[in-house]
Amino acid sequence: MKITFYGHATFKVITPEGIRILIDPWLDNPQSPAEKDLGPYDLILITHAHGDHLGNVLEIARTAATEVIAIHEIQQYLLARGIPNVTGMNIGGSYRTRGLTITMVQATHSSSIQEEDTILYGGDAAGFVVKLEDGRSFYHAGDTGLFYDMKLIGELYQPEVAFLPIGDHYVMGPREAAKACELIKPKTVIPMHFGTFPLLTGTPEAFEKHLKEMAPEVGLKVLKPGETIEL
Ligand code: NI
Ligand code: MN
């Protein structure tokens, strides 16, 4: 799989068979590189409804060739705004499409959409595990605090790669994210959701220190916005 980091929680993943996935499509985030792939994508996964995760979905999912996958409440919201191809699901379930198995998993976070003075209910916040055509999996945790059932995600799906938030304040900080690695046991962890705003103070350096203490067997790969790795 080819993984490109676009800053914040936005990742492009190209699967071994060439399926193009974008996760949490905030393509104009403050860390976003100038050069980026605007699509069209085959799949767009949305972990929850906060603006920094819904991102630019209303602009980049306008044709039926792009399938958006999100929790039921976000599906209803996007369909009502003219996005043609949206699949709703809910936590604990798996959806098989294009040779992939996409499982929506728990996250401990909130989820809502702000429209002027109104806050719309966005369903629960979630994460995704994606099983690729070759049997390997990756896990994008979305925005979340640490929860012990991450151990179940590790045991059931054995993700080779985990994208975990480390920025603190709204999500796990470096110490909690290192504990998450101890529970999930991925081969590689890629930190996300740090440094975008001043409140997101967790750093990859602090994460590395805690990871060495709590889960030294997990490989750390810090991606710069725009950087691609192949795993
Ligand atoms: Ni959020
Ligand atoms: Mn967020």
Image (tube, rainbow, N blue to C red):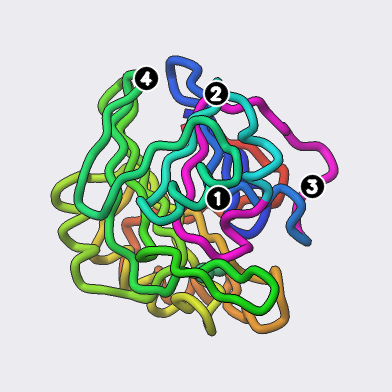
Q: Which of marks 4 and 3 is nearer the N terminus?
A: 3
Asked if residue 162 can be seen in this view, the reply is yes
Tell me the number on the disc at residue 24: 1
Amino acid, disc 3 = Pro
Lateral position of residue 51 relative to residue 87, left or right: right
Camera-side mark, 2 or 3:
2
Asked if residue 230 can be seen in this view, the reply is no
* Label 4 – label 3 distance at C-alpha: 29 Å
Magenta stretch? 31-55
Q: In this view of the protein, which residue sits in the foreground, 118 or 39? A: 118
Tell me the number on the disc at residue 98: 4
* Residue 130 highlighted magenta (yes or no): no
Amino acid, disc 4 = Arg
Q: Which of marks 4 and 1 is nearer the N terminus?
A: 1
Camera-side mark, 2 or 4:
2
**Quadrant in the picture for residue 109:** bottom left
* Label 4 – label 1 distance at C-alpha: 19 Å
Q: Which of marks 2 and 3 is nearer the N terminus?
A: 3
SS category of the residue bearing label 2: loop
Mark 4 Cβ inside 8 Å of ligand 2: no
* Residue 45 highlighted magenta (yes or no): yes
